[in-house]
Amino acid sequence: MNSRSDILNEIEILKKKKNAIILAHFYQTGDIQDIADFVGDSLALSQKAASNDADIILFAGVKFMAETAKILAPEKKVLLPDMNAGCSLADSCKPEDFEKFIDANPGRTVVSYVNTSAEIKAMSDIICTSSNAIQIVESLPPDEKIIFAPDRNLGNYVLNKTGRDIVIWNGTCHVHEEFSLEAIIKLKAEYPDAKIIVHPECEMPVRMVADFIGSTSSLLSYTKSDASNVYIVATEAGIIHQMKKANPDKIYLPAPPKDSTCGCSECSFMKLITIEKIYFCLKNEKPEIYLDKEVILKAGKPIMRMMKISKKLGL
Ligand code: SF4
C-alpha cells in the first residue's frame, strides 16, 4: 500500500469483510469524519452504538466514548485506534475522589456527564450529554438535590437554567476552558455581523457574550438554519468541517484561545486518531476496549435511563 487512496480503499474492504462500522465524533479531523459510517456528538453516537448490526465498532473518538459503546453493545468488539486518546475532563474525576465527594454530599442524585470513565458512570444515577443535560435535570422531581459531575462550566450552565439545588464537581475541559473572552470580543469587532456560538462547557464570561449556546450538534443545526453568514465558533474546531459541508459559502472563525500559540481550539486527545491508525486497528482488531462485566452492568443502567428520557422527549 503506497498511497492514501490505497489506505482508504483498504479500510472500506476491511469494514465489509469484518462487518465493521466506524463511528466518528464531530471533533475528529475532516478526513476521518468523511470515511465514517456515522458522525455525531456523544448522544447521537451512543444511540448509534446501541442500535446497529455490525460485529465490530471502531470508535474514532476518545476512550470514554468507546467505553460507552462497549457498555451499550457488550456483545460487540469495540476498537479504539489509540488507547492514549483520553480526555482531560474525564481524567479530572477519579473514582476514589468521586466516592468521597458523593459521601460528603449524601442524599443527592448523581447526574454525570457522558464525559466520564465507565467507573464513574457505574457510580451515577443518571447520565447526560450536553445535548440533553437541562432536560435530564428537569426530568427529576423539583425538590431532588443533585450532584453534577464532572464539568463545572456545564454544571453551572445547567444550574442557572434550571434553578435546581446542584453541587458541582470542579472539572474542566482543556479546550473549552481556554477560549479568550478578550480575543473573541476583538474578533467580533473585526466581524461585527458575526454570531458568537458557544458550547456550554465554556466559561461563563464567554457564554455571556454568546448569541447562541448549545451542544456541538445544536451549534451545527443553528448554523444550518440561521440566516447569518459569519460565525465565531467557541467549541472544538473539528465541527467546522460539518458546518462547511452544510453551508460552504458561510464563514466560520474558530474562537481564539487565551494562548494564541497553543492551537488549543483543537482537542489533543481527539487528534491522536489518524487514518493510518484506523487502518491498522481494523486490520489487527486491536486495541480493543475491555470492561469488567459488573462495571458494564452498573454503568449501563444510568446510560439507559438517559436514553429512555431522551427518546421520550424526542432528543
Ligand atoms: S474536547 Fe475536552 S471534553 Fe472533549 S474529549 Fe477533548 S478534552 Fe475531553
Image (spheres, rainbow, N blue to C red):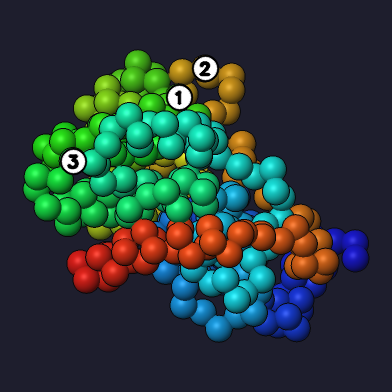
Element on which disc 1 rests = helix
| CA gap, disc 1 and disc 3 | 30 Å
Q: Nearer the viewer, residue 276 or 301?
A: 301
At x 71%, y 55%, the residue is 81
Disc nearer the start of the sequence (2/3):
3
Please provide percent x and percent y for residue 130: 33, 48
For the C terminus, the quadrant is bottom left
Label 2 with label 1: CB-CB less than 8 Å:
yes
Q: Give the labeled residue for mark 3.
A: 145
* Residue 166 horizontal side relative to residue 58, left or right: left
Up the image or down, 237 lies above or below 220; here it is above
Disc nearer the start of the sequence (1/3):
3
Label 1 with label 3: CB-CB less than 8 Å:
no
Q: Give the labeled residue for mark 1.
A: 178
- Three-letter amino acid code at the position of disc 1: Glu
User: 10 Å neighbourhood of mark 1: few (<14), some, or many (≥20)?
Assistant: many
Residue 259 badge:
2
In the image, which is nearer the foreground, mark 2 or mark 3? 3
